[in-house]
Image (tube, rainbow, N blue to C red):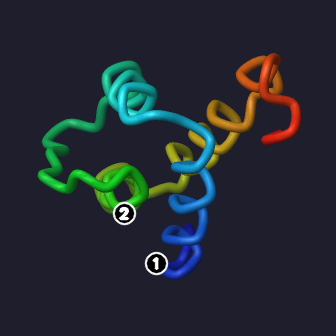
Amino acid sequence: MWSEANIEAIAVALADTTTGRGINDYFTNNPVYGFSCSESTKWKRLKAYFIYAQKRLGNDSRVKDAIVHFMNPALFLRRSDEY
């Protein structure tokens, strides 16, 4: 399980790799029952999701899945400088 400080750092880093729509799509494809968030900032939405998912599921699988998803090299095909 990740500490809140680590979750925040991961959320900030991942938010820089995607758009708000990308995050919405990730939440849609990886739902955690009962999760809702009114935050508008990308990293704050990710942080809230990660914290909720860890508590609800009892593991850190969604954090790890999100890292793999958002850091997928294919997503940076035309943005290699960002990767």
Q: Earlier in the sequence, mark 2 or mark 1?
A: 1
Instruction: Identify the residue at horizontal 31%, vertical 22% (top origin).
Output: 28
| x then y, percent, for residue 52 | 29, 57
Q: Nearer the viewer, residue 10 or 42?
A: 42
- Label 2, label 1: how many angstroms apart (C-alpha)? 7 Å
Left or right position of 34 against 42: left
Quarter of the image where one finds residue 79: top right
**Cβ atoms under marks 2 and 1 closer than 8 Å:** yes
| x then y, percent, for residue 3 | 52, 78
For label 2, the residue is 51
Left or right position of 13 against 5: right
Establish if 6 lies above or below 73: below
Q: Amino acid at mark 1?
A: Glu
Left or right position of 15 against 33: right
Q: Estimate how packed mark 2 is, as few (under 14), some (14 to 19) or many (20 or more) residues with alpha carbons within 10 Å.
A: some
Q: Nearer the viewer, residue 37 or 32?
A: 37
Q: Amino acid at mark 2?
A: Ile
| x then y, percent, for residue 82 | 79, 41
Label 2 SS: helix
- Quarter holding the C terminus is top right
Instruction: Identify the residue at horizontal 49%, vertical 71% (top origin).
Output: 8
Instruction: Identify the residue at horizontal 23%, vertical 51% (top origin).
Output: 40
| x then y, percent, for residue 44 | 34, 61
- Quarter holding the N terminus is bottom right
Q: Nearer the viewer, residue 34 or 19?
A: 19
Q: Residue placed farthest to the right in the image?
A: 80
Instruction: Identify the residue at horizontal 73%, vertical 37% (top origin).
Output: 71
Q: Estimate how packed mark 1 is, as few (under 14), some (14 to 19) or many (20 or more) residues with alpha carbons within 10 Å.
A: few
Label 1 SS: helix
Number of numbered discs on residues: 2
Per the rendering, the mark at residue 4 is 1
Establish if 2 lies above or below 68: below
